[in-house]
Image: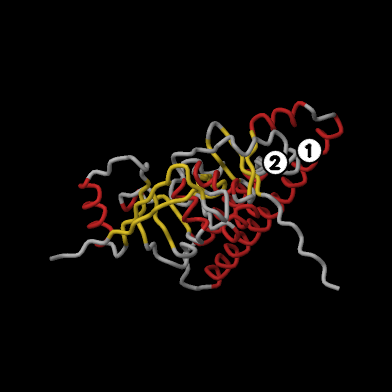
């Protein structure tokens, strides 16, 4: 007898100072697979806080993406600051000791990894030094090089002893649904309808600033496809400057894309869902 499929777990989105962040790597993967949502990597490492090329977790989501995810029943939003304050203040002596013990065990594991790396580098350096000694043409400076390698290995060992561990997630210490915000908390009836419309039709969207638009729209995962549209959203009664249409259309055509504009129809919703009804137009520039 086939077992019924397990209900998919809702994705937790942390609201911190008005920014929507996802810290859990499993949740990030689920967003990409199930909800056509990539987000933007904004995290950096404590060891290299000035890096600005290769960022990591958490990912940041735009407010309209969060609204679309909540409407689709894929995610929920929590007040992460209040949840952490409540969890930390409610910790008893036993919980505090368990938390400190877990940090110490993770620190020991990190020490072991660094010690193995240092031992491997030291053995490679010693092997090279022995080869130089066996070489009749090698100078006496070769032995000094080996000593320098050993001293550098010692300095690395001393650095390992002062290694600290910074937890990247507090999922084991904070209740996932604590201080969950109501679904209407981030709902905006004017903006975000185009984003919800495109996501619900299977498109992926990323910030489109590099192409002079609000969104870059992809037919699939951005790691596999190029963007097909440069998209801007306008209000239903908003006047669109003709220079925006001409400039957007020419630029999009120059980079082998189409310029897409759209907006929410007033007082209209799609009959098959709670998402608003959206009218969209695709513009391409054709030379005379």
Name the foreground residue: 200 vs 179.
Answer: 200
Q: Point out which mark residue 99 bears.
A: 1
Q: Position of residue 52 (x, y in %)?
A: 44, 46
The residue depicted at 52 percent of the width and 54 percent of the height is 38
- Split into 4 quadrants, where in the image is the N terminus? bottom right
Name the foreground residue: 1 vs 58.
Answer: 1
- Furthest toward the left, the residue is 288
Q: Is residue 144 visible?
A: no
The residue depicted at 75 percent of the width and 31 percent of the height is 87
Q: Is residue 5 visible?
A: yes
Q: Position of residue 104 (x, y in %)?
A: 76, 42
Number of numbered discs visible in the structure rendering: 2
Q: Is residue 233 left or right of residue 97?
A: left
- Split into 4 quadrants, where in the image is the C terminus? bottom left
Alpha-carbon span between mark 1 and mark 2: 11 Å
Q: Position of residue 161 (x, y in %)?
A: 68, 43
Mark 2 = which residue? 170
Name the foreground residue: 143 vs 59.
Answer: 59
Q: Is residue 238 left or right of residue 124?
A: left
The residue depicted at 76 percent of the width and 60 percent of the height is 6
**Which image quadrant is residue 123 in?**
bottom right
The residue depicted at 26 percent of the width and 61 percent of the height is 284
Callout 1: 10 Å neighbours few (<14), some, many (20+)? Answer: some
Callout 2: 10 Å neighbours few (<14), some, many (20+)? Answer: few
Secondary element under disc 2, as helix, strand or loop, is loop
Which mark is nearer the camera, 1 or 2?
Answer: 2
**Which image quadrant is residue 165 in?**
top right
Secondary element under disc 1, as helix, strand or loop, is helix
């Amino acid at each position: 007898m086939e077992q019924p499929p397990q209900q998919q777990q809702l994705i937790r989105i942390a609201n911190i100072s008005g920014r929507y962040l996802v810290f859990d790597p499993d949740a990030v993967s689920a967003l990409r697979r199930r909800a056509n949502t990539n987000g933007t990597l904004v995290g950096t490492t404590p060891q290299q806080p000035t890096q600005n090329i290769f960022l990591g977790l958490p990912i940041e989501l735009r407010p309209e993406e969060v609204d679309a995810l909540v409407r689709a029943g894929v995610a929920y939003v929590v007040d992460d600051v209040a949840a952490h304050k409540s969890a930390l203040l409610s910790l008893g002596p036993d919980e505090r000791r368990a938390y400190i013990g877990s940090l110490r065990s993770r620190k020991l594991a990190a020490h072991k990894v660094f010690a193995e790396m240092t031992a491997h580098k030291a053995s490679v350096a010693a092997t090279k030094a022995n080869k130089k000694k066996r070489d009749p043409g090698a100078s006496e400076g070769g032995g000094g090089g080996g000593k320098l390698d050993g001293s550098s290995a010692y300095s690395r060992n001393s650095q390992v002893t002062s290694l600290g561990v910074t937890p990247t997630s507090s999922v084991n210490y904070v209740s996932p649904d604590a201080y969950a915000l109501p679904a209407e908390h981030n709902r905006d009836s004017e903006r975000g309808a185009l984003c919800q419309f495109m996501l619900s039709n299977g498109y992926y969207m990323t910030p489109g600033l590099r192409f002079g638009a609000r969104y870059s729209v992809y037919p699939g995962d951005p790691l596999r496809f190029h963007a097909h549209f440069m998209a801007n959203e306008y209000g239903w009664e908003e006047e669109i400057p003709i220079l925006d249409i001409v400039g957007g259309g020419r630029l999009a055509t120059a980079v082998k894309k189409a310029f897409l504009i759209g907006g929410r129809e007033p007082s209209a919703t799609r009959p098959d869902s709670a998402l608003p009804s959206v009218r969209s137009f695709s513009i391409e520039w054709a030379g005379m």
